[in-house]
Image (cartoon, helix red, strand yellow):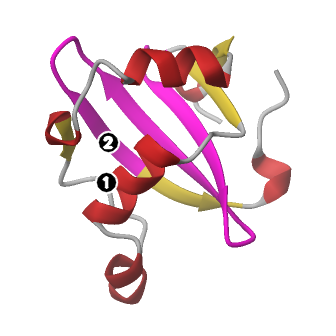
Amino acid sequence: MVEGHKISKKVEADKFLEHIQEYEQENIEITKHTFFHFSDEQRKIYNESWVKEMFFNEIPILVGIQNNGLWALFYKYEKKIFRFIVDMQPDKIYIVTLYIIDETEIPKI
């Protein structure tokens, strides 16, 4: 793993959920790179509205801040684990990348 992608600080899920209450769904921006790792078929299912739904309505199983300052959020959904890489700015949240990972890839912090 790239050193910048390692999680340096764990954040409790409830603290994260409190923090994002300051944002509206309009404050979430999907980047060109968000769905880079997904096939066309996966992009039909896991699209922008799905991302926002997960972000605001589901409780992550793990939240951490990476060495590079980006946030890593892990959600379990339909027997899959999703890793969101997120850039939290004061006025916007950028969803940088989204991966489906194996359960063994969840970091131990």
Whether residue 93 is visible to the viewer of this picture, yes or no, is: yes
Label 1 with label 2: CB-CB less than 8 Å? yes
Label 2 secondary element:
strand
Residue 84 counted in the magenta span: yes
Which residues are drawn in magenta?
68-97
Q: Secondary structure at mark 1?
A: loop
Which residue occupies 25% across, 35% down?
A: 94
Give the quarter of the figure containing the N terminus.
top right
- 102 horizontally vs 104: left or right: left
Amino acid type indicated by mark 2: Ile
Q: Is residue 45 above or below residue 73?
A: below
Q: Residue at x 53, y 20 (%)?
A: 16
Distance from label 1 to label 2 (Cα)?
Answer: 6 Å
Q: Which residue is mark 2?
A: 95
Going from the N terminus, do you reach mark 1 or mark 2 first? 1
Residue on which disc 1 sits: 34
Is 2 part of what is drawn in magenta? no
Image quarter where the C terminus lies is top right
For residue 107, side relative to residue 101 (left or right): right
Q: Nearer the viewer, residue 6 or 72?
A: 72
Q: Position of residue 9 (x, y in %)?
A: 65, 10
- Nearest the eye: 18 or 82: 18
Residue at x 62% of width, y 27% of height = 63
Quadrant housing residue 12: top right
Q: Nearer the viewer, residue 104 or 61?
A: 61
Which amino acid, by three-letter code, is at mark 1? Thr
Residue found 34% across the figure and 77% down from its top: 43
